[in-house]
Image: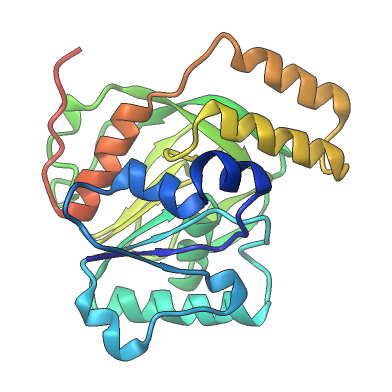
Amino acid sequence: MYSLLLACEDSDYVKKVYGGYFNVFVAAFGEEGEKWDLYRVVEGEFPDMDELHKYDGFVISGSPYDAYGNDFWILRLCFLLQTLDAMEKKILGICFGHQLLCRALGGKVGKASTGWDIGIRKVKMVNDLSPCNFIEDLNDIPPSLSIIECHQDEVWEVPLGAEIIAFSDKTGVEMFTIGNHILGIQGHPEYSKDILCNLIDRLRTNDSIEKGFAEDVKSKLEDADPDRKCWEKICRNFLKGRRFEFPST
């Protein structure tokens, strides 16, 4: 049994095409026969603390909010993540979720000095990971994977005991782990290119990004694709506690 902690509101586009972000996440990370619950934490909807033990894992979504903000629901979510960490529950943080996991467990997050990262970026896996890390057979994962990115904040410093397992030319902490129960991913393994294109249009409409920048990013998307299947497998295997096994390339 799994839970999605949704830190954003459903866009009109995602509601119309996918029925909401919950369906997007379950399609990407869920498997047949599993039960998933939705908690709209951005609206103050949280799981009962007495029910946490029932869940095998939790996923924290992206968000337009700052992971270093002090909105009440963000602080409450930090406390929940600290509780789940103490219980050693599986926690997968995506974008904002990746950053908030870091903050809640003692790391530092903030604005990226290089500005927005939007589009498809090649993420490089770290070669020398400790043998206790849950990715035991890293050699079976390609040395680099393309993922959809859309963020202007980033992890500055990982928590004590965390291990950085991937980086990019733009962002120093693309992925980090703590033990076998916490995984943060800065990119969006659940996103498809159409979802990103709609998000770019909305960011342009509300003047978060410049028109020229938006057009340049969208034109580059035509010639690139994220490694979605590989990312989905990484996330599913993490949540289910399975070893990573990929075909040799």
- Res 170 → quadrant: top right
Foreground of the two, 133 or 91: 91
- Quarter of the rendering occupied by the C terminus: top left
Q: Which residue is drawn at 88% across and 42% down?
A: 207
Q: Is residue 88 above or below residue 35?
A: below
Foreground of the two, 243 or 42: 42
- Quarter of the rendering occupied by the N terminus: bottom left
Whether residue 169 can be seen here:
no
Q: In this view, does 207 lie above or below 104?
A: above
Q: Which residue is drawn at 65% across and 34% down?
A: 117
Foreground of the two, 38 or 71: 38
Q: Where is residue 57 in the image (x, y as percent from the top left)?
A: 26, 64
- Res 167 → quadrant: top left
Q: Which residue lies furthest to the top in this view?
A: 223
Q: Position of residue 50 (x, y in %)?
A: 29, 91
Q: In this view, does 246 lie above or below 68?
A: above
Residue 162 shown left or right of residue 46 in the figure: left
Whether residue 183 can be seen here:
yes
Residue 25 shown left or right of residue 90 in the figure: right
- Res 161 → quadrant: bottom left
